Image (cartoon, helix red, strand yellow):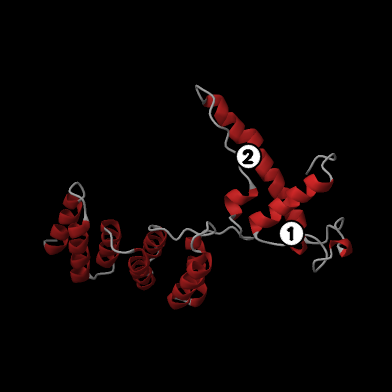
Amino acid sequence: MLPKEVKGAQLGQIMRGFASSLGVRCEHCHVGEGPDLSKFDFSSDQKLTKRTARVMIQMVQAINQNHIAKLAELEDSPQEQVEVTCMTCHRTQAKPLMLGDILAETIEKDGIEAAVVQYRQLKEKYYGGFAYDFSPGTLTGLGERLAAGGNFDAALSILQLEIEMNGESASIYFTLGGVQARAGMREEAIKSYESGLELAPEDWKPFFRQQIERLRNP
């Protein structure tokens, strides 16, 4: 996948770039263990991860050369060229899943309590970096997704975790009220909308009043 003239220090720099992008070491793709690279069989294609890496490199090259390059042709004036790299998706993780997807998988396998514990552990380990998005909205989106699938208990737990982790906001209370209403929790939904109404800017308040009125006078 790399030009034949790439050798020595330049090749090492490229390999270190792959490793840091995925948060792995040489043995992730190459046959060998430990710090002594002279004992590695770098020519071996035994590992699936090495064969997978070739396909991923082809994908990145295709995106940059065949797609992003075409976007530049649409611009009226030259813009700074955007380039996709391994880090763009992997964000120092070997398996580049988004935080919401990781938690949803855990909820399905092990339940909501395990997912809450997992979120706290991931936040303690990765907060401040860019491996996962802990900003407001990630848990809200997951809560909406769970509610859409009918898992209201898990959705409500995730939304309460959002409030605990990222504070109260009009938007989270609007989502919480909507999920509670769909779950048949009319009084709780009204209280959530009322809490959101207090926090909402003036142009948002009519939306909260409309939902409160709808629940009080169905």
* Mark 2 secondary-structure assignment: helix
Q: Residue 57 at what x, y percent from top left?
A: 71, 46
Q: Is residue 11 left or right of residue 200?
A: right
Q: Residue 112 at what x, y percent from top left?
A: 43, 74
Q: Tell me how far mark 2 sits from mark 1, CA to CA.
A: 21 Å
4 or 210, nearer to the observer? 4
Q: Quadrant of the C terminus?
A: bottom left
- Residue displayed at 61% across by 51% down: 87
Badge 2 vs badge 1, beta-carbon distance below 8 Å? no
- Residue displayed at 73% across by 62% down: 25
Q: Is residue 79 left or right of residue 213?
A: right
Label 1 neighbour load within 10 Å: few <14, some 14-19, many 20+? few
Q: Residue 28 at what x, y percent from top left?
A: 74, 62
Farthest top residue in view: 76
- Residue displayed at 59% across by 29% down: 70
168 or 113, nearer to the observer? 168
Q: Residue 69 at what x, y percent from top left?
A: 61, 31
- Looking at the rendered structure, the kind of residue marked 1 is Thr
Image: 14 above or below 177: above
Q: Quadrant of residue 183?
A: bottom left
- Looking at the rendered structure, the kind of residue marked 2 is Ile
Farthest front residue in view: 9
- Residue displayed at 63% across by 39% down: 63
Mark 2, residue position: 63
Q: Is residue 201 left or right of residue 66?
A: left
* Label annotation for residue 104: none
* Mark 1 secondary-structure assignment: helix
Q: Is residue 57 left or right of residue 106?
A: right
* Label annotation for residue 49: 1
